[in-house]
Amino acid sequence: MSTTRSLKTDKKQLLTDTALTLFYRHGIHAVGINEVLKVSGVAKKTLYSYFSSKDDLILAALAARDEIFMVWLAQQLAPANNDEEVITFLFKGLSDWFHGRVPALSPFRGCFFINTSAEFSEENTAIAEYCREHKRKVRALIQQHLHAPDEVLLDTICLLKEGAIVSAFVGKDLDAAEKCVGVLMTLIPKSG
C-alpha cells in the first residue's frame, strides 16, 4: 500500500516539477497541458486525478517555487548578525541567482511570481492572490531578520529587491543587486 502511495506522490511531484520548469522557462500561457504530459511522461488521466484544471497545476507550481525560494532566502539571511549583513547577504544572494550560481533557483528567468502576475490580469483569482501572498512572505522573512524595527528600511529593501530582479531580467543588468547595497547602507544609522 505504501509503495502505491509513494508512486502516486512521485507522479504528482513529477507533474508539479515539470510544470514549474516549463512555466518558468517559457511562460504559463505558452505551455499547454499536453507539453507538461509529454515532458513528464505521465498520462493525461493521471494528471487529472491530481489536478482538476490547468489553474490547479499552476497553483501547485507556484507552491513548489514558493517553498524552494523561501528555503533559499532563509538560508541566505540566517547568518546575518545585523542589518548591514541582512542587506549584504540578501543582495549578494540575488546577484548569485542572477549570475546562475544558485542551482536550486534554476537558470535565472526573473521572478516566477512577477512573471505569473503579468500573465494573469484579473486580480481576484487564486493565482493572483498566491503571488501576492508570496511577496508578503518574503517581506515578513526579511523583516524577521532585521534588527531595527524600521519600516522605511524594510520598504526600501523590498522595493529595491523587486527592482533589481526586474532590472536583471528585463534590462539584462546582472549587476543590479550590487548597485542596491550602497543605497541601502545610507539608510542604516551609524553607531558611535
Image (spheres, helix red, strand yellow):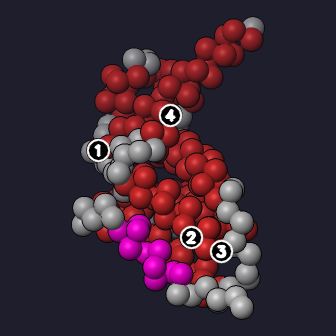
Which mark is drawn over residue 138?
none
For mark 2, give the secondary structure: helix
Who is closer to the viewer here, 22 or 85? 85
When asked about the image quadrant of residue 110, the answer is bottom left
Residue 26, numbered circle? 1
Residue positioned 66% across, 16% down in the render: 6
- The 10 Å Cα crowd at callout 4, few under 14, some 14 to 19, many 20 or more, is many
Q: CA distance from mark 4 to mark 3?
A: 36 Å
- Residue 42 is a magenta residue: no
Q: Quadrant of the C terminus?
A: bottom right
Q: Nearer the viewer, residue 106 or 57?
A: 106
Cβ–Cβ under 8 Å for marks 3 and 1: no
Q: Residues within 10 Å of mark 3 (few under 14, many from 20)?
A: some
Q: Are marks 3 and 2 in contact (CB under 8 Å)?
A: yes
Q: Is residue 94 above or below residue 40?
A: below
Determine the CA span between mark 4 and mark 1. 15 Å
- Residue under circle 3? 83
**According to the image, label 2 marks what residue?**
87
Determine if residue 10 is in view.
yes
Please give left or right for residue 14 compared with residue 83 in the image: left
- Residue 16: assigned label: 4
Q: Amino acid at mark 2?
A: Ile
Q: Earlier in the sequence, mark 4 or mark 3?
A: 4
Q: Which amino acid lies under the numbered mark 1 shown in the image of this protein? A: His
Secondary element at tag 3: helix
The location of residue 28, given as percent across then percent down, is: 35, 47
Residue stretch rendered in magenta on the structure: 176-185
Determine the image quadrant of residue 182: bottom left
Q: What is the chief secondary structure element of the magenta stretch? A: helix
